[in-house]
Amino acid sequence: MNSKLHGWLATARIANVPSVISNVWLGIALAVWLRGADDPRALMIKGAVLALSGVLLYIGGNFFNDWHDREWDAKYRPERALPSGLFTPLSYQLRAIRFIGLGVVFAFLISVPAAVVAAAIAVLIVIYTRWHKKAVWPVIPMGLCRALLPVMGFLAVMVDTSKPHPFALSGHAWSLIAVHTAGLLCYIMGLSLNARYESVPNPPVAAKRLARILLFMPVVLIGGWWLRDHALLALVGLVPFLAWSIPLLVRRHSVPVTVSGFLAGIPLVEWMASLPIAMAMVPAGESVFTYPILMNTLVLPALAFMAGRRLQGVASAT
């Protein structure tokens, strides 16, 4: 592969892009669960544009991060594209601005609420990038950059700006998106903390335990939400996540392998909700594959997981 192309893909963290698409669709699927899908074609188009917005924000954030960390990378990660001289710092800065700006614009094309969430993600990208090498707390804004992607998809479908009070959603609707956002946020924070403390010689025991608790909080939050009304589907939805995550912690792996594994597992967090949503909405006696929205909800997390693992062979996920 051309060295510049490989450097670009590595900077973009291309292996994590499929999970970004899955993040956005989770929010749309949750909205479909509450409102139904009157126009599947329009909803699929809306999902594609919002997914593009999320991908642009994610890639732009990675370029901005590598531009900001170029001196640190020159010392500790000299193999990266910028310190190795493949690109100029200015080119990275300009790409970051373009990608993040386009991400907000594409969200605006769908709805103002989606654009507000996209703009919030852009601000969080700057906060995380500015302070992540100096403290532990930036794992919160970093996690929110991912956790707000489902919110963007959810509000784009749920909020009707033609109404006098467009954000006057039911308490159940806000609870639904809050629980799933919290589950994804905990997972991303746990992933980041686990990577941080696994790479130091004598990590604090309490910090490592906290990281592991956060990694499995989606089981309590997301799994617990669906367990109340769809117990069997919820339990089946937990199996891929647990089967993938537990061995990553139990077996001895290098830090990059462990972190890459947890990054690939992000769509499995979403499948805890996607399976109950898709299967519970299928009319009795019919197949999920006859309903494009439900089929996409069921299949996309699995495809994102497999694509992410395959792309990790092309360029590093970290």
Image (cartoon, rainbow, N blue to C red):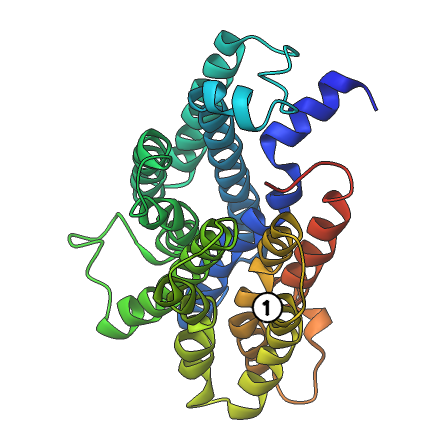
Q: Of all residues shown, which one is farthest toward the front?
A: 202
Residue 11 at what x, y percent from top left?
Answer: 60, 28
Front residue of 189/240: it is 189
Q: Is residue 48 above or below residue 158?
A: above
Residue at position x 58%, y 69% in the image: 271
Residue 262's place in the image compared with 3, above or below, is below
Q: Nearer the viewer, residue 248 or 185?
A: 248
Residue 282 showing in the rendered view: no
Residue occupying image coordinates x 66% and y 12%: 86
**Residue at the outermost left position:** 164
**Residue 248 x, y percent position in the rendering:** 63, 66
Residue 203 drawn at (x, y percent): 42, 57
Residue at horizontal 61 percent and vertical 36 percent from the top: 13
Q: Secondary structure at mark 1?
A: helix
Q: What's under tag 1, amino acid-wise?
A: Leu
Q: Position of residue 308 (x, y in %)?
A: 69, 50
**Above or below, 126 relative to 201:** above
> Which residue is nearer to you in this view: 306 or 86?
86
Q: Give the quarter of the figure containing the C terminus.
A: top right
Considering only vertical position in the picture, is 241 above or below 231? above
Left or right of 46 in this view: 317: right
Which residue shows up at 36% across the image and 37% down it? 132
Is any part of residue 250 visible from this angle? yes
Nearest to the observer: residue 136 or residue 11 = 136
Total marks shown come to 1
Q: Residues within 10 Å of mark 1 (few under 14, many from 20)?
A: few
Q: Quadrant of residue 35?
A: bottom left
Badge 1 is on which residue? 249
* Quarter of the figure with the N terminus: top right
